[in-house]
Image (spheres, rainbow, N blue to C red):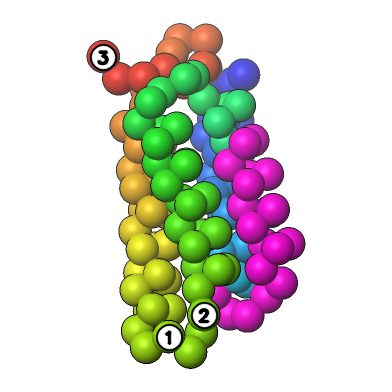
């Protein structure tokens, strides 16, 4: 895959994840948004070479999204903490994707 196209595709998938998270935190349908996050993360993982750091960051983001959806809104401070954890997990995934390098064939490879 062309490196520019790969980067554009990754950016589009991450934007879709951000939108799903925004819908989740603003009162959208939790089940639908969690499924959307899961689908986008699977797409992202298919686009990149296996990398334990990226896999862990994607798993962490998915776990945070599920925890946010499962939290009771009336628990004091829980929603604020979970939203912060969700934002941090999203940032970590972006960071890990940014640390991966593009190979000469356009495939993403883990940093050496």
Which residue is at the front of the view, 62 or 104? 62
Magenta residues, as a range? 25-43
Earlier in the chain: of badge 1 and badge 3, it is: 1
Which residue is at the front of the view, 58 or 108? 58
Label 3 belongs to which residue? 112
How far from the left and from the top, in percent, is residue 87? 39, 63
Give the residue displayed 61% in from the left and 26% down from the top. 46
Element under disc 3? loop
Label 1 belongs to which residue? 75
Disc 1/disc 3 C-alpha distance (Å): 44 Å
Give the residue displayed 58% in from the left and 27% down from the top. 47
Earlier in the chain: of badge 2 and badge 3, it is: 2
Choose top left, top right, bottom left or bottom right for residue 112.
top left
In the image, residue 3 above or below residue 79 = above
* Helix, strand or loop for the magenta stretch, by majority: helix
Element under disc 1? loop
Give the residue displayed 41% in from the left and 23% down from the top. 51
Give the residue displayed 57% in from the left and 35% down from the top. 44
Residue situated furthest top in the rendering? 104
Are the residues at dot 2 and dot 3 in contact (C-beta closer than 8 Å)?
Answer: no
Label 2 belongs to which residue? 72
Disc 2/disc 1 C-alpha distance (Å): 6 Å
> Is 32 within the magenta?
yes
In the image, residue 112 above or below residue 21 = above
Element under disc 2? loop
């Amino acid at each position: 895959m062309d490196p520019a196209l790969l980067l554009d595709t990754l950016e589009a998938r991450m934007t879709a994840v951000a939108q799903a998270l925004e819908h989740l935190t603003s009162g959208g349908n939790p089940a639908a948004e969690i499924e959307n996050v899961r689908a986008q993360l699977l797409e992202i993982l298919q686009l990149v070479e296996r990398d334990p750091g990226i896999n862990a960051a994607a798993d962490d983001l998915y776990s945070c999204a599920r925890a946010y959806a499962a939290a009771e809104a009336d628990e004091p401070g829980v929603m604020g903490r979970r939203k912060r954890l969700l934002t941090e997990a999203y940032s970590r995934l972006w960071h890990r994707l940014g640390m991966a390098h593009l190979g000469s064939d356009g495939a993403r490879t883990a940093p050496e």
